[in-house]
Image (cartoon, rainbow, N blue to C red):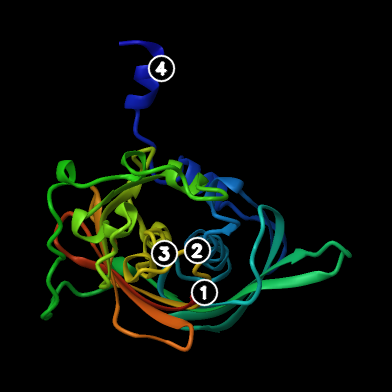
Amino acid sequence: MSEAASAQAVRATIGDSEFDRDTAVTPRAPGVYDVDLSPGWTIISAVNGGYLLAVLGRALADALPHDDPFTVSAHYLTASQPGPAVVRTEVVRAGRTLSTGQASLFQYDDEGREVERIRVLASYGDLGALPDDVRTTAMPPAIPPMEHCFGPEDGPAPIDGSSAITERLMLKLDPATLGWALGAPSGRGEMRAWFGLADGRDADPLSLLLAVDALPPTAFEIGLSGWVPTVELTVHVRCRPAPGPLRVSITTRNLAGGFLEEDAEVWDSADRLVAQSRQLARVRLG
């Protein structure tokens, strides 16, 4: 085996992967962190919202007495750009089983003024301490085997602008939700895919914050195109995912007034619902 092939065969691990390096935060002072937003997680013209949520999630994991995000709610105020940023955190409450904090990410505009890009309120705990009982009517999404699904490399010419994030993801989309890529969207607001990180790193609670916002927008399958910026995104992390690829299902039931919701479920290789989310996004009509 060649040296290059050997390098590709080595899977990245949690804590030692591109995702971990690109979401790293450096403490500057209590509650203040420096970060360099990587251009590798951009799509069209902006930094991906799930990646940004993971960056703030990592800062809060350092600032709070608990490590695992349970619920994270983010409001996206202005579009983030690759480059330096500052995250400021505040501990709202530190309890025995749950702690709550808030965080904001700031960058500077062309005049040197500080601009808030995203604000988060989150509760953290210990996912490993939760009881094992599960009572649910939810079912894993029916997605064809991975070899019968398609990734960005199988599609038409790249979209206008950056598609760098697709090089860092393992995405295999359900053909039933790919009509938009062939110029024949189904009109149903659905998107389903197998998901992982391209370097083979297994999922953890922080990468689930990325997973819920990493698929193409459901607006594409409704028949719309262009950037679909997130206004608000709330994620519930239910348990630590088992090793292996994830399955992500996203649905939209209502588009009105230029806004739509996206409801996402993330399932692990053990058929457990490991994360859920809802976001409000803006679409360009006409």
Q: Are marks 3 and 1 in contact (CB under 8 Å)?
A: no
Identity, as a three-letter code, of the amino acid under mark 4: Ala
For mark 4, what is the residue?
4
Q: Residue at x 27, y 72 (%)?
A: 187
Point out which mark residue 267 bears: none
Give the distance between the C-alpha atoms of the residues marked 3 and 1, in whole angstroms.
18 Å
Helix, strand or loop under label 1: loop
For mark 1, what is the residue?
284
Q: Quadrant of residue 31?
A: bottom right
Give the distance between the C-alpha atoms of the residues marked 2 and 1, in whole angstroms.
7 Å
First in residue order: circle 3 vs circle 4: 4
| CA neighbours of label 3 inside 10 A, class few (<14), some (14 to 19), many (20+) | many
Q: Nearer the viewer, residue 254 or 21?
A: 254
First in residue order: circle 3 vs circle 2: 3
For mark 2, what is the residue?
226
Residue found at the very far top of the displayed protein: 2
| CA neighbours of label 2 inside 10 A, class few (<14), some (14 to 19), many (20+) | some
Identity, as a three-letter code, of the amino acid under mark 2: Gly
Foreground disc of the pair 3, 1:
1
Q: Are marks 1 and 4 in contact (CB under 8 Å)?
A: no
Point out which mark residue 213 bears: 3
